[in-house]
Image (cartoon, rainbow, N blue to C red):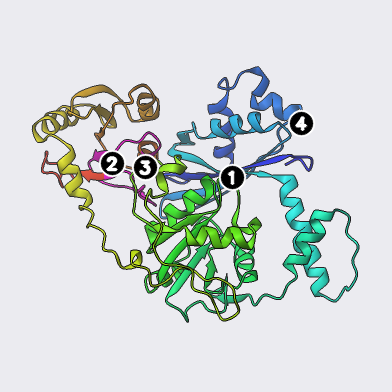
């Protein structure tokens, strides 16, 4: 990738089969060709130096391939965002059904500034008493970050020294976020270091009152959903929209923690930041002062002990959503159709369209009223991801196959589970 890149597009790949790097590159060029017009056409942009060499890493395990794509660009913000969005239209890589999801777009200059701050901090800690660094803002940040903090280790992940010693736990994204909270006296904090929450931290959340505190962007939103799927989340708060935890002031951190709200799983699409944050009043407890005079996280509030109504089981939701007779008729029709045929049904279980599995994303773009997807075949990760992106609440197929992660917004059922029709093994 080009060293002069202004932005880095970072995307995640999931494929229901074994693929290689060449398959990914071919899919990117082949399936975005003609989508973006001459000005943003990928091959010509790369030839002109506006798009750098693609960095692709793929690994396969148990018949499922996952990996990352990193693309550097010198385009402006809008053009880079359009290019990034075009990657998510890819639905097949090599011979496999696949999905691509953009995790973030990095500002290379901002990343370099963070590196300058981190490196300058290391230099000061190594014994350089007087380092003249140009740039008043950088000097200020470095001065703050060199204040003494006691960064501990929890199974290889950055943490505060009080993790495991108190009932409260704050989960943040990474090392810089942990350091930021420690600087302001909040020491019961641990960082997950990436978008995949490790098992050690997921297990830790089960025995604590957990507050998830993430960046105020789509990345923080996704990380919250990931943590909620594998661990227990009691409260949630975010940095202000568009800001990150590691750059907040002490007052902003305390304000965010004071305004945390009870977390309740939401069926909202992950793209809608405002819908994922629960619209509830903050807890009534006040910030309890610590011995060192720094405000701590609210504890002992009435809200923390409030019992929330039990959510109905996912299968019950499916039964409630569909009309049995209409679903039976649709299921009978699809079982007589060709393999991998799909049916899109509306709220009354009336057929909207019949298509092939490969056309699912395109047909959902055309039919906003779709409430149920029936598949004459297995349900894979690809169909689940497409359904989640299009706010489809229910998907039904023969069985579930090669699914790494189930979106919380999609109810999954199989024909045998719903007693609709027998399915041959």
**Helix, strand or loop at mark 2:** loop
Q: Which residue is mark 3?
A: 268
Q: Horizontal and vertical percent for residue 253?
A: 57, 61
> Which residue appears at 41% of the width and 51% of the height?
63
Q: Does label 1 or label 3 sit earlier along the sequence?
A: 1
Q: Horizontal and vertical percent for residue 422?
A: 12, 41
Q: Nearer the viewer, mark 1 or mark 2?
A: 1
| Category of crowding for the residue at label 1, using alpha-carbon neighbours closer than 10 angstroms: few (below 14), some (14–19), many (at least 20) | few
Q: Which residue is mark 2?
A: 378
Q: Left or right: 401 with respect to 256? A: left
In three-dimensional space, the C-alpha distance between marks 3 and 4, rounded to whole angstroms, equals 39 Å
**Helix, strand or loop at mark 3:** loop
Q: Which residue is mark 1?
A: 242
> Which residue appears at 55% of the width and 70% of the height?
295
Q: Nearer the viewer, residue 127 or 138?
A: 138
The answer to which quarter of the image holds residue 152 is bottom right
Looking at this rendering, what residue extends furthest in the left direction?
Answer: 325
The answer to which quarter of the image holds residue 318 is top left
Q: Nearer the viewer, residue 213 or 151?
A: 213
Q: Nearer the viewer, mark 2 or mark 4?
A: 4
In three-dimensional space, the C-alpha distance between marks 1 and 2, rounded to whole angstroms, equals 39 Å
**Helix, strand or loop at mark 1:** loop
């Amino acid at each position: 990738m080009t060293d002069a890149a202004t932005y880095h597009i970072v995307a995640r790949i999931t494929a229901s089969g074994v693929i290689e790097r060449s398959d990914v590159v071919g899919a990117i060029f082949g399936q975005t060709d003609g989508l973006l017009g001459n000005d943003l056409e990928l091959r010509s942009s790369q030839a002109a130096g506006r798009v750098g060499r693609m960095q692709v890493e793929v690994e396969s395990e148990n018949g499922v391939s996952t990996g990352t794509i990193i693309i550097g660009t010198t385009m402006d913000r809008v053009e880079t965002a359009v290019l990034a969005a075009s990657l998510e239209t890819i639905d097949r890589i090599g011979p496999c059904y696949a999905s691509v999801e953009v995790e973030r777009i990095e500002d290379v200059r901002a990343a370099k500034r963070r590196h300058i701050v981190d490196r300058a901090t290391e230099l000061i800690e190594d014994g350089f008493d007087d380092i003249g660094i140009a740039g008043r803002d950088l000097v200020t940040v470095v001065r703050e970050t060199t204040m003494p903090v006691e960064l501990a280790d929890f199974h290889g992940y950055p943490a505060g020294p009080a993790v495991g010693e108190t009932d409260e736990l704050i989960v943040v994204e990474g090392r810089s976020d942990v350091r930021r909270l420690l600087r302001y006296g909040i020491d019961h904090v641990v960082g997950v270091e990436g978008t995949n929450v490790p098992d050690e931290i997921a297990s830790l959340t089960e025995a604590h009152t957990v507050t998830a505190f993430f960046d105020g962007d789509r990345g923080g939103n996704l990380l919250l959903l990931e943590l909620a799927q594998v661990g227990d989340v009691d409260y949630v708060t975010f940095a202000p929209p568009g800001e990150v935890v590691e750059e907040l002031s002490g007052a902003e951190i305390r304000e965010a923690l004071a305004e945390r709200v009870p977390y309740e799983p939401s069926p909202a699409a992950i793209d809608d930041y405002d819908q994922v944050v629960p619209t509830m009043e903050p807890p009534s407890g006040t910030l309890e002062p610590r011995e060192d005079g720094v405000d701590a996280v609210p504890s002992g509030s009435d809200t923390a002990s409030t019992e929330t109504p039990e959510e109905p089981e996912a299968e019950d939701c499916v039964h409630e959503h569909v009309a049995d007779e209409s679903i039976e008729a649709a299921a009978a029709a699809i079982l007589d159709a060709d393999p991998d045929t799909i049916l899109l049904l509306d709220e009354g279980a009336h057929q909207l369209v019949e298509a092939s599995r490969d056309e699912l994303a395109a047909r959902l773009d055309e039919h906003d009223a779709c409430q149920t997807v029936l598949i004459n075949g297995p349900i894979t990760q690809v169909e689940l991801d497409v359904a989640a992106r299009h706010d489809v609440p229910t998907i039904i197929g023969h069985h579930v196959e090669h699914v790494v992660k189930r979106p919380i917004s999609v109810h999954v059922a199989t024909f045998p589970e719903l007693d609709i029709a027998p399915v041959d093994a």
